[in-house]
Amino acid sequence: MYYIDESGIPRTGFALYTAVGIPVADAPHILRTWQALREEWCKNHGIPVDYELHASDFLAGRGRPGGRNPLKIERYRMAQQALDLIGTHPGIQIVTVYTREPAHWGVAKRRAYDRLLRGLDRRLAEAGETARLVVDGDGSEHLYSEVHEQVRPGRIPVTAVEVPAHTSAWLQMADLAAYSACQAIAQQQSREFMWGWYARHLPKAAPPKPC
């Protein structure tokens, strides 16, 4: 199963997709480990276990989880803990694809998702496996079904299912990985503290691939 989230900077036409591959057999253990981390945050920082971890807001200091407002340095450390959890598990795969189309962010998104889908299909074919995709969304995005119909990936039998991220720990993991990849590439000055996170905390991830 691959869980997918997008990131990027719309005004510059920079679009990015990150897929986090979760082995079915390992999923229960990974989820228990994630739950234990969230319980630790609740105990130490007052952040409810079911509070949605949305990286761009959380790391910018927006939101008051559980009525509290953790210091930014605390938020940074928590995000790095979460990335370490993802990055140290031997079975988790992370794939990032990005592109730029300054005149049209929608075109960039479509191109990036197309290349991600083709890349995942090749990986699965080499491994002799099939997979399903879950992407953050509310069911209103036609891009995923349209690109799937065009690519017709043999190892991914059905189009991605859209699920709201606040209901899925897996998609929140993908969101954090995607945002880290975004900042590794875009290197916004306001997020300089994140520039090295993708390589440092997700060392087994394939380097982000331009298309």
Image (cartoon, helix red, strand yellow):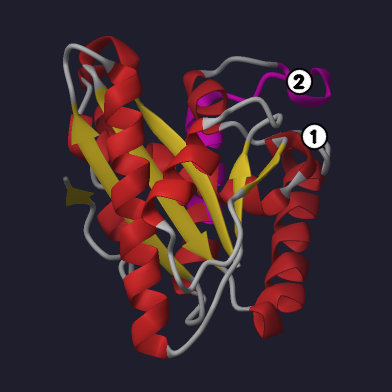
- Tags 2 and 1 in contact by the CB under 8 Å rule? yes
Stretch in magenta: 64-82
Q: Secondary structure at mark 2?
A: loop
The type of residue carrying mark 2 is Arg
Q: Mark 2 packing: few (<14 Cα in 10 Å), some, or many (20+)?
A: few
Report if residue 77 is visible in the image. Answer: no
Label 2 or label 1, whichever comes before in sequence order: 1
Left/right placement of residue 9 relative to residue 74 reads left
For numbered disc 1, what is the local secondary structure?
A: loop
The C terminus is located in which quarter?
top left
Q: Residue at x 40, y 63 (%)?
A: 94
* Mark number displayed over residue 46: 1
Q: Which residue is mark 2?
A: 68
**Is disc 1 surrounded by few (<14), some (14 to 19) or many (20+) residues within 10 Å?**
some
Question: Could you say where residue 152 lies in the image, as x and y percent from the top left?
Answer: 43, 59
Relative vertical location of residue 120 with respect to residue 198 in this rendering, above or below: below
C-alpha gap between disc 2 and disc 1: 7 Å
Residue 57: x %, y % from top left: 55, 21
Which residue is rendered at x = 65% and y = 54% of the image? 170
Amino acid type at mark 1:
Gly
Query: Which of the two residues, 139 or 61, is positioned nearer the viewer here?
Result: 139
Residue 195 percent location from the top left of the image: 24, 39
Q: Residue at x 39, y 65 (%)?
A: 120
Residue 81 is a magenta residue: yes
Quarter of the image for residue 2 reads: bottom right
